[in-house]
Amino acid sequence: MNRCSIFFSDHCFRLFSHSSHLGFASNYFPLFCLRRFLSQGHSISSSTDARPFPDYSPKKPTIRDSEFVHQISTVIKLRRSEPLRRILKPYESKFRPDHLIWVLMDIKNDYKLVLDFFDWVCLRRDPTLEARCIVVQIAVASKDLKLAHELIHEFWAKPNLDIGLSYSHFVDRLIYTYKDWGSEPYVFDIFFQVLVEAGLFNEARKFFDKLSNYGLIISVKSCNLLLTCLSNNSDGIEMAIKVFNEYPESGVCWNTASYNIIIHSLCQLGKIKEAHNLLVQMELRGLMPDVVSYGTIISGYCHLGELKKVLKLIEEMQIKGLKSNPYTYNSIILLLCKAGKVVEAEKVFREMMNKGIFPDNVVYTTLVDGFCKLGNVPTAYRLFDEMKARKIVPDCITYTAIIHGFCQTGKMMEAVKLFREMISGGLEPDEFTYTALIDGYCKAGEMKEAFALHNQMVQTGITPNVVTYTALADGLCKRGEVDTANELLHEMCEKGLQLNVFTYNSIVNGLCKAGNLVQAVKLMKEMEMAGFHPDTITYTTLMDAYCKMGEMAKAHELLREMLDKGLQPTIVTFNVLMNGFCMSGMLDDGERLLKWMLEKGIMPNATTYNSLMKHYCIRNNMSATTEIYKCMSAQGVMPDSNTYNILIKGHCKARNMKEAWFLHREVVEKGFDLTASSYNSLIRGFYKRKKFMEARELFEEMRKQGLTAEKDIYNIFVDMNFEEGNMEITLELCDEAIEKCLVDKAMNEKT
């Protein structure tokens, strides 16, 4: 390729575009032909004052040296298949390093011969730096860029190299040998790349500046390598941004990949807004952002929880015809789950699959964990099954999430079944898996099983953590075994584990659940004396205990104390107060609290509304219940399993069976669980309305769910089947009732 010198003149223009937010330097925009020239990686001249490259003028050989070099050149040119080591054996003892350059000058047009001869020399002695540079120039001229790269890299890989001196010598020789060896400007790109790859960033920048004096600039591809390597190190990000600002002044035209590197760097620094501004600036300069540009900023906003901005960027992408990649979708799903918007996350998940982008283990695990935390374990388990059906293997984290979900909803049999499945599948439970099960057993009051699992955990070499001990202590306190709990905590401290606020809070909670409020208040004072400050959870736990005792004045007193200490109430704190008002029959105060929360921008959740609806249902005031439910929907709060159970029982009590049936179907579709109490209410309601088919369907559905109907429900269906002559079913139901200890005189007579 002919060397070109292209000057910026009236045929080119410079577009000044400053960002008030970033201060990024203005860029150059030459005409289309120049941009195309640059995009192909060529070097250009950016100044009419460019220094000319020096002429190559090696030391002239003596007559004897000339004859010797001529002999060698003739011999190697005339060789056939003989190896050089054989034909050059007679000349080996007289061969000097400076002979190499003179021979290269004679054979430079035969690239294969150059390589063979250079290899022969290298096996005997280290070639001079000048000779190495000459071979690099010949390799580039012959389009053997890989070898050129290797030859330069080989030099910089030498041990104990004086970087400063070596850099200076190499640059001088590379520039000195450039002009008369048929090379191309890309030789300088290769040298620049090797410097960058070796981590010699300062030398690379010095070389860039030196080269610009000769009217050449490094290609944007090589400059991007510098940006990438700098941004891979947290200490180099600021330098990468500086390079990005400065290099356009020397003629570098950054491309989309360049902008993406800096956008990613800014996001790494947490400067998401600046990264977004750069995206806008990029378009103003005629470059189109791609999926990577958008995906990086979307990921940044996801970490900040800026859902609105994320959705707006996705909309922008769709308008521009850009398809989100798996990484972008994963970030959005993670953000939505983190924000508790798991239902919306699943919608994005389905959209992702409809577009042919298939989720991985991380996405499924995130959704499973999200639904479990929401209390919607059936949907989480459906996703867990779907994941396995798609041959995506659940890992320890996935199993732990679903096990924890079952434990939190009291379904210990299902949790243990998964625990065993996990082990049989070759996965090893970790401390979090064991702790989830231990906590579940403790919450269920099954302390024998909890301690058995604790012992198994220790035997397998897994050390229980603070959370494990806290769960056990909490379970013991709930059973009134405070002394045993204290012994356990002493054991924990002896093992080097430190008590923390969370541990104290759990014991306070256990004491409150056991009705030992005096001891709980005493422990809070001991906690302060030990240097641990009670937090919002501590106060909320005690407030909950007072509210359940109907002592709303003491609950208010704790709230004031909490606020005086600068602690902010959470939604749980407000839910505790709401429940207290409702349990005390102060529903008007409860509604005032709800109104105040909305005015202050504190978003109530399903539990807040459930408390009010439950107590209006108890009063058989379905009109007020419906209004609360409408308010809940208007605020965008999703109903949970408790919401549906409250509404179904309320409508059944008010004999609104049509509405109750509609809600039942909605529960089934959404994958929520109905309680045995709700099924009993529905069955009684339909039976009283002589809707026997619906009642029978609900009874069978209830049995399939593993729920136990009340005695009068069994009596209804035993009588019904007996009168219809269905003796087999009658006997089956009688046996079932006996097994569940629901036998009465009527049943005994029928058996």
Image (tube, rainbow, N blue to C red):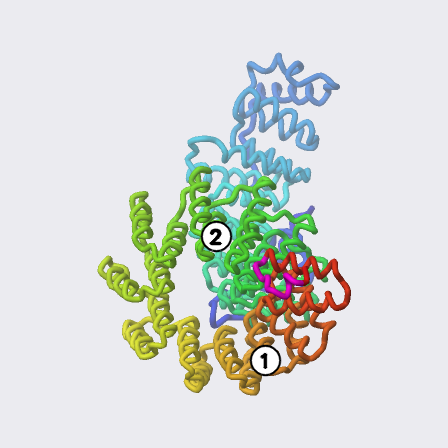
Q: Is residue 230 magenta?
A: no
Mark sitting on residue 318: none
- In this orientation, which residue lies closer to the viewer: 104 or 650? 650
Give the quarter of the image for residue 512. bottom left
Q: Is residue 626 visible?
A: yes
Q: Which residue is mark 2?
A: 436
The picture places residue 290, in percent across and down from the top left corner, at 64, 62
| Range covered by the magenta-colored residues | 740-749
| Element on which disc 2 rests | helix
Name the residue at 54% across, 45% down. Answer: 192
Give the quarter of the image for residue 645. bottom right
- In this orientation, which residue lies closer to the viewer: 626 or 44? 626
Mark sitting on residue 653: 1
Q: Residue furthest top?
A: 90
Q: Would residue 125 appear left or right of 347 to someone viewing this image?
A: left
Cα gap from disc 2 to disc 1, whole angstroms:
38 Å
Q: Would residue 408 appear left or right of 552 to someone viewing this image?
A: right
- In this orientation, which residue lies closer to the viewer: 363 or 564? 564
Type of amino acid under label 1 = Lys
- In this orientation, which residue lies closer to the viewer: 652 or 637? 652
Above or below, 201 relative to 280: above
Above or below, 708 relative to 170: below
Name the residue at 52% across, 65% down. Answer: 301
Q: Is residue 741 magenta?
A: yes
Name the residue at 57% across, 24% down. Answer: 122
